[in-house]
Amino acid sequence: TSSKNFSNNIRNIYIPVLIASTGSNLDAVIAGRIPDINPITAANPVPKTILPKPKTNSKSNTFVRIKEIIQTFPDLEVCLDVATAFACPFEGEMKVEDLSDFVKRYYELGIRTFNICDTIGYTNPKKVKEVFRKLIKELPNAIYLAHIHDTRGMGIVNSLIAIEEGVSGIQSTVAGLG
């Protein structure tokens, strides 16, 4: 079922649309049926060995596409899912300052909600505390969510630290599904 057909059959349900590439699921957005989107962008650059044609989905092209979406649909609520915010399996640990600069760039576009993702389950409580303290201090009017994986058995602890630091929500799964 396309997102357009799906949205025709529902009423009064909050359904943000996850946009893994900035060209997908936009049919429903364009039709005006979906009020919220969650585009995904990686905080770390994708190595050329993984993505031989970096122009196709580079950070800068994703930024430009998200900017176009925001300008075209100014009433659209956007929650930016920031993948690899803590670490990347190819690039290693993300520097907190670099992450902060990355988030600020999207904040300047008008995005006010950020889902900070531990995409590979690499992070630890100290890093979670450091990241959310910095982000909340620098952009206190933004809304932050945490997307934490339990790859190394740290998911619950990292989620609790994120809550203590002031995030507005936690994404979770049931039995590791989702």
Image: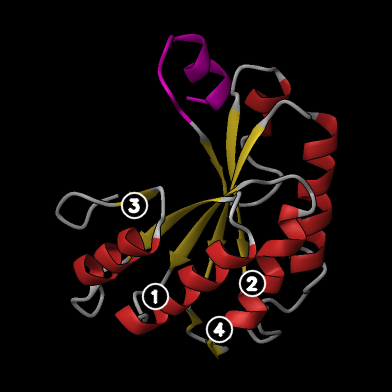
Task: Please report the residue visible at 63 percent of the width from the left and 24 percent of the height from the top.
Answer: 28
Residue 147, image x and y in percent?
39, 59
Residue 102, image x and y in percent?
69, 69
Amino acid type indicated by mark 4? Met
Residue labelled with disc 1: 129
Task: Please report the residue visible at 68 percent of the width from the left and 17 percent of the height from the top.
Answer: 32
Task: Please report the residue visible at 61 percent of the width from the left and 35 percent of the height from the top.
Answer: 25
Residue 82, image x and y in percent?
56, 62
Q: What stretch is highlighted in magenta?
A: 1-15
Whole-angstrom CA distance, mark 2 to mark 4, is 10 Å
Q: Residue 170 carries which label?
A: 3
SS category of the residue bearing label 2: helix
Whole-angstrom CA distance, mark 1 to mark 2, is 14 Å
Q: Which colour scheme is used?
A: secondary structure
Amino acid type indicated by mark 1? Lys
SS category of the residue bearing label 3: strand
Residue 132 seen anywhere in this rendered image of the structure: yes
| Identity of the residue furthest to the left in this view | 175
Q: Residue 100 carries which label?
A: 2
Q: Residue 94 carries which label?
A: 4
